[in-house]
């Protein structure tokens, strides 16, 4: 939901602002950004930005709002969102809680703020798995993409997991299948080439993220 062209226009409106880009953006967008973040380290990355700098957070406004509450940093949020996480509604979480009253609610920060407000714990995919693994609770309502359930059951034997809504299936993620992976490994196709002038600038954006301790 963000293009390099649109980002360049926003940067002209806010000269000197630091662009924090979610890692699931194109190389061309990263090349126009200052530093990357993941849902797991977004709070830490925003904390690393000097307080006298304005921040443009792209492209997920839900993740940006969550980070803003955790960092107390005002940010200009891009009008974008993750389709899959944005589908989750408070009504669906309420219904799931009624059906599983003993379950803790685990929500991804890319969900709407009114949904994350209902959670017992909000974190990235890895963080949610770790929480479920370490928790003494036996039942959990999960508010993130359905693919997480495989690892949750694998790492948390004897525990039960219920999706907050059956709509938590990402069509983009499901476009990658085992057959396609097998074919790609066998044929080394398709290959994607990123122009060097974009690759080099995008790499700087990623390396800055990795440098943050």
Image (tube, helix red, strand yellow):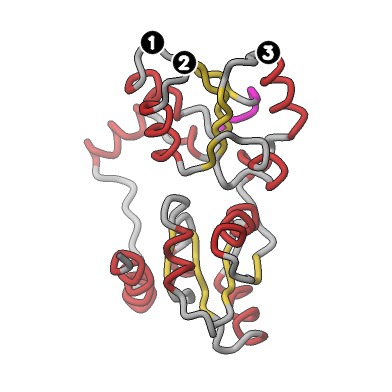
Q: Are marks 2 and 1 in contact (CB under 8 Å)?
A: yes
Question: Does label 1 or label 3 sit earlier along the sequence?
Answer: 3
Q: Quadrant of residue 186?
A: top left
In the image, 27: left or right of 116?
left
Q: Residue at x 60, y 54 (%)?
A: 66
Q: Secondary structure at mark 2?
A: loop
Cα–Cα gap, marks 3 and 2: 15 Å
Crowding at dot 3, Cα within 10 Å, few <14 / some 14-19 / many 20+, comes out as few
Crowding at dot 1, Cα within 10 Å, few <14 / some 14-19 / many 20+, comes out as few
Cα–Cα gap, marks 2 and 1: 7 Å
Q: Quadrant of residue 95?
A: top right
What label sits on residue 138 in the rendered view? 2
- Residue 35: x and y in percent read 42, 71
Question: Does label 2 or label 1 sit earlier along the sequence?
Answer: 2
Query: Which residue is tagged 3?
Result: 99
Above or below, comparing residue 75 to residue 65 in the picture? below
Q: How many marks?
A: 3
- Residue 80: x and y in percent read 65, 57
Which is more toward the observer, 26 or 124? 124
Which is more toward the observer, 162 or 183? 162
Residue range of the region highlighted in magenta in the rendering = 165-169
Farthest top residue? 158
Query: Which residue is tagged 1?
Result: 158
109 in magenta:
no
């Amino acid at each position: 939901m963000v293009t390099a062209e649109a980002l360049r226009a926003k940067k002209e409106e806010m000269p000197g602002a630091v662009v924090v880009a979610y890692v699931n953006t194109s190389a061309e967008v990263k090349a126009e950004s200052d530093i990357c973040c993941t849902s797991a380290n977004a709070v830490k990355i925003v904390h690393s930005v000097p307080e006298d700098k304005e921040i443009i957070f792209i492209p997920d406004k839900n993740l940006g709002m969550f980070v803003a509450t955790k960092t107390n940093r005002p940010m200009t949020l891009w009008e974008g969102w993750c389709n899959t996480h944005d589908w989750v509604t408070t009504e669906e979480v309420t219904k799931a809680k009624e059906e599983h009253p003993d379950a803790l609610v685990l929500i991804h920060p890319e969900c709407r703020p009114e949904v994350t407000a209902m959670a017992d714990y909000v974190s990235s995919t890895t963080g949610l798995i770790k929480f479920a693994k370490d928790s003494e609770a036996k039942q959990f309502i999960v508010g993130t993409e359905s693919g997480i359930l495989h690892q949750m059951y694998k790492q948390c034997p004897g525990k039960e997991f219920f999706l907050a809504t059956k709509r938590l299936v990402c069509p983009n993620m499901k476009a990658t299948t085992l057959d396609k992976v097998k074919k790609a490994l066998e044929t080394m196709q398709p290959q994607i080439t990123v122009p060097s002038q974009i690759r080099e600038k995008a790499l700087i954006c990623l390396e800055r993220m990795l440098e943050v301790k």
